[in-house]
Amino acid sequence: MKKVVFFAFVSFLFVGCLKDKCEQRTTYLQYERVYVTPDEYRSQPITYDAPQELQEPGKIYFYRHFILINEVRRGIHIIDNADPTSPVKLGFIHIEGNHDISVMNDVLYADAYSDLVIMDISNIQQPVLKERVEDVFSSRYFTGDEGLLSHLEPTEVEEVIDCSDQHFGRSWFTRDGAIFAERSLAQNANGIGTFNFDASGSPQMHTTGQGGSMARFTITKHHLYVVGDAEIFALPIYAGGHVGEASRTPLPWGIETIFPYEDYLFIGAINGMHIMTLDDPGQPKHASTFSHANACDPVVVQDNIAYVTLRGGTACGSFTNQLDVLDVTDIFNPKLLHTYTMDNPHGLAVLDNDLFICEGKYGLKVFDVSNISAIKQNLRSHIKGFHAFDAIAIRDHSLLVIGNDGFRQYDFSDPSNMKLMSLINVTRP
């Protein structure tokens, strides 16, 4: 990998003022671009290794009685969750450049930077590589002479800003092509781990798993759908799990998440929510857009009600922190019903009358949504003291929660008395 200095995020420590002169000593994070070439990441073997510690967890996925947790850019933890009170780490699938996961009929689909990796996991402790489709997602990444832009790595440095500087006292600003922001903003840039940069004959019956609201992969209608920054890919899935040629549908820049519901795809973007129809599953069509101010924007849908969290103070821009509730009965004309203020909402999940909102460093909130006109008044639980990034609600009343400090499972049989069943902590080197 090659590293190139890029920009900095700043955290303000204190201000000192003497008469007409004042200055601000700052500690900031100077980021470096890290590039990787196809030869480098394709030369890394895809292997099944012994269980490893969670270090930088990303997306989560639930399939049968297994939990799959992405280790950012490194691979997938496999956990046997037959007993939610005592999950067992089985092993680790090393996939260089992995961020997202989806499964259908015991076939795992995972990204490996610009490639798609397809694996047979019918024996999940002996996964078999079926196919590697190269460069199917190349447009999701910025590429240059140095290779593909993998991510940004921070280095902490210090400087002094004089009060005469136009940027004195601001929580974020740009200068000489660099971006500066408070440490809290930098840490929330992608919710978990280091800041990642993305530039811009089918079987008749199938069993898929369940991803979180932050997913960029999903499977429905015998197709794998993948979102990039300004596009959606549709890949038909054939017998045996192989995929056909990908179609690519352009979308406005700023796409973040994807959520399937009935015959539609709900796409979360930094400036709104897009709804795509799947009358022709291989060619998703834009139906409508609900626009909002720039903010990070995952979405989940149940009973023609869409729940959208907007998070500010991040790379998505804005300082908005709220929950929007929309009526999507008419998918060509979504209507905003209610807006509720939140602390710092990230991912979310809904099941029956229970809405779960991950509030980042503010923990997890559970709301009763039987009356959508009074959601804020019907807070059932607020669990604090940990970081919550995304969640999956399971029919057996298990809630899976991932955060930058670990993986938790709760029994929400009584949402007013959430019971922690198990915890797998993050262990950083």
Image (spheres, grey):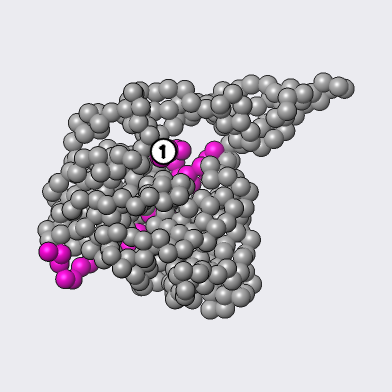
Q: Which residue is mark 1?
A: 199
In the rendered image, the vertical position of residue 26 relative to residue 400, given as above or below: above
Q: Quadrant of the N terminus?
A: top left
Q: Position of residue 242 (x, y in %)?
A: 15, 54
Nearest the eye: 395 or 84 = 395
- 55 on left or right of 12: left
Query: Which residue is outermost to the bottom?
Result: 370
- 212 on left or right of 44: right
10 Å crowding of disc 1: few (<14), some (14-19), many (20+):
some
Instruction: Please tell me which residue is depicted at 72% across the width and 33% down the height of the picture.
Output: 169
In the rendered image, the vertical position of residue 137 relative to residue 153, given as above or below: below
Q: Position of residue 295 (x, y in %)?
A: 55, 51
Asked whether residue 350 appears in the rendered view, the answer is no
Instruction: Please tell me which residue is depicted at 21% across the width and 58% down the height of the picture.
Output: 236
Which element carries disc 1, helix, strand or loop? loop
- 75 on left or right of 157: left
Instruction: Please tell me which residue is depicted at 25% across the width and 39% down the height of the picture.
Output: 135
Number of numbered tags placed on the structure image = 1
Q: Position of residue 366 (x, y in %)?
A: 53, 67
Instruction: Please tell me which residue is depicted at 56% across the width and 27% down the height of the picture.
Output: 178
Residue range (magenta): 186-215
| Residue 223 highlighted magenta (yes or no) | no
- 56 on left or right of 49: right
| Residue 195 highlighted magenta (yes or no) | yes
Q: Quadrant of the C terminus?
A: top left
Q: Main secondary structure of the magenta part?
A: loop
